[in-house]
Amino acid sequence: MQPSASSRVRQFEDGEQFQLLVQSVVDYAIYMLDPEGFICNWNEGGRRIKGYEDEEIIGQHFSQFYVEEDRAAGAPEHGLRMARENGRYEKEGWRLRKSGERFWASVVIDPIWKDGELIGFAKVTRDITDRHLTALRLEEAQKALLQSKKIEAIGRLTLGLSHDFNNLLTVIVNSLDLITIHQKDPERVDRLVQGAQRAADRGMLLTRQLLTFARGQSLAPEIIDASKFVAGAKDLLTRSSGLDVHIEFSLADALPAIFVDTTQLEAALLNLVINSRDAFKESGTIRIGTGLIEERPADMEASAAQFVCISVSDDGPGMTDEVLQQAVQPFFTTKDVGRGSGLGLSQAHGFAAQSGGYLLIDTAVGRGTRVSLCFPTVEN
């Protein structure tokens, strides 16, 4: 005949059943501290994890489980105080076994109250060294992977820039050589001068991109009229677009002023024009326009109600969704080696954001691309 439930309970009087349960736990060190932090009792898990026998540890202060630097910093007392004040204290850190070996522990301290009086603390410690070391190895692996990606990106950048500058210098040197040969042909000399000038402009832009990327954009903004600024840069933008590219301007009148760094704005526009030019296999049309809008990205917080946008559009092949997702990332480029550093759209995007605005890309395969730099308006 099986004993009744009540008779089984009576077999474990005075908390014996609970004591057996606690003692059976070997993966956790469970022990009770008095209000000052001295150890009153503990379980088999404590003996296994810490390495002490009962007679060696009962009556000792629990701070002897802490590493020297934590004891000196008052970590044991801090844990008891936080548990008393907040009702619970959790922490991870290094602890010591009897042998002096360190292990990574997850610690929970709970205060024990009786009739409103603190009579001690319940402390639970778990050895999670393996998990901690695994996390550290994963973190190191992630850092190594990130460093590898940085080195790879720098390698791509260096390779691309070396080809870029070599090509530009070749254009300039060849143009100068041909000018000396064809001095009596004004039209040809003029074309050669324009070609050399475009190469020099491209080299200047690459240098700006590198300086911006290396030190961050230190802006010196001023109040300007966007349409007047673009009109003043027509010659530079036209020259940068190339001989086989037709460039059109559509500039709105009486736009509100914007507050931007003109040097960075010129660099951003050059980047957009050169990107459009490079998108063409042979010839094409680039349109540069200005306008006023009252829209902004849904996730953007801005005090301005209106934005002045300078857009550069082309009738090139357009971008795929995959390319669009990565378009503003540094070093990303779909151009062949020697035709792009991957910093153009990144610079334009960062400049617009730093100026309180945003960059908007409207594109689709087969219908070209329009990139707009949008800046908040200011009161005159």
Image (cartoon, rainbow, N blue to C red):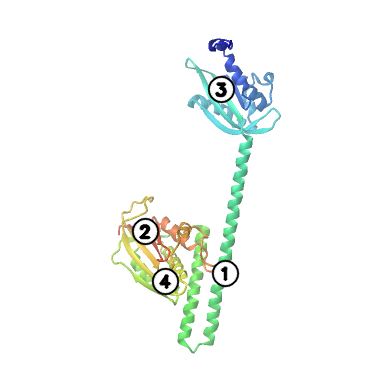
Number of numbered discs = 4
- Three-letter residue code for mark 4: Leu
Q: Which mark is residue 122?
A: 3
- Three-letter residue code for mark 3: Ala
Answer with mark 2 or mark 3, whichever residue precedes in sequence.
3
Which residue does the numbered mark 2 point to in the structure image? Answer: 375
Answer with mark 4 or mark 2, whichever residue precedes in sequence.
4
Judged from the image, the secondary structure of the residue bearing numbered disc 1 is helix
Compared to residue 117, the image places residue 271 above or below, namely: below
Instruction: Give coordinates of residue 3: x percent, y percent.
Output: 57, 11
Per the model, the C-alpha gap separating discs 1 and 4 is 23 Å
Is there CB contact under 8 Å for labels 4 and 2?
A: no
Answer with mark 1 or mark 4, whichever residue precedes in sequence.
1
Is there CB contact under 8 Å for labels 1 and 4?
A: no
**Which one is closest to the eye, mark 2 or mark 1?**
1
Judged from the image, the secondary structure of the residue bearing numbered disc 4 is helix
Per the model, the C-alpha gap separating discs 3 and 4 is 74 Å
Decide: few, some or many residues near mark 1? Use Cα within 10 Å; few <14, some 14-19, many ≥20. Answer: some
Compared to residue 206, the image places residue 59 above or below, namely: above
Is there any visible trace of residue 109 in the rendered image?
yes
Instruction: Give coordinates of residue 131: x percent, y percent.
Output: 61, 37
Decide: few, some or many residues near mark 2? Use Cα within 10 Å; few <14, some 14-19, many ≥20. Answer: many
Answer with mark 3 or mark 1, whichever residue precedes in sequence.
3
- Three-letter residue code for mark 2: Phe
Per the model, the C-alpha gap separating discs 4 and 2 is 20 Å
Instruction: Give coordinates of residue 75: x percent, y percent.
Output: 58, 30
Asked which quadrant contains residue 19, the reply is top right
Judged from the image, the secondary structure of the residue bearing numbered disc 2 is strand
Which residue does the numbered mark 1 point to in the structure image? Answer: 163
Answer with mark 2 or mark 1, whichever residue precedes in sequence.
1
Per the model, the C-alpha gap separating discs 3 and 1 is 68 Å
Q: Quadrant of the N terminus?
A: top right
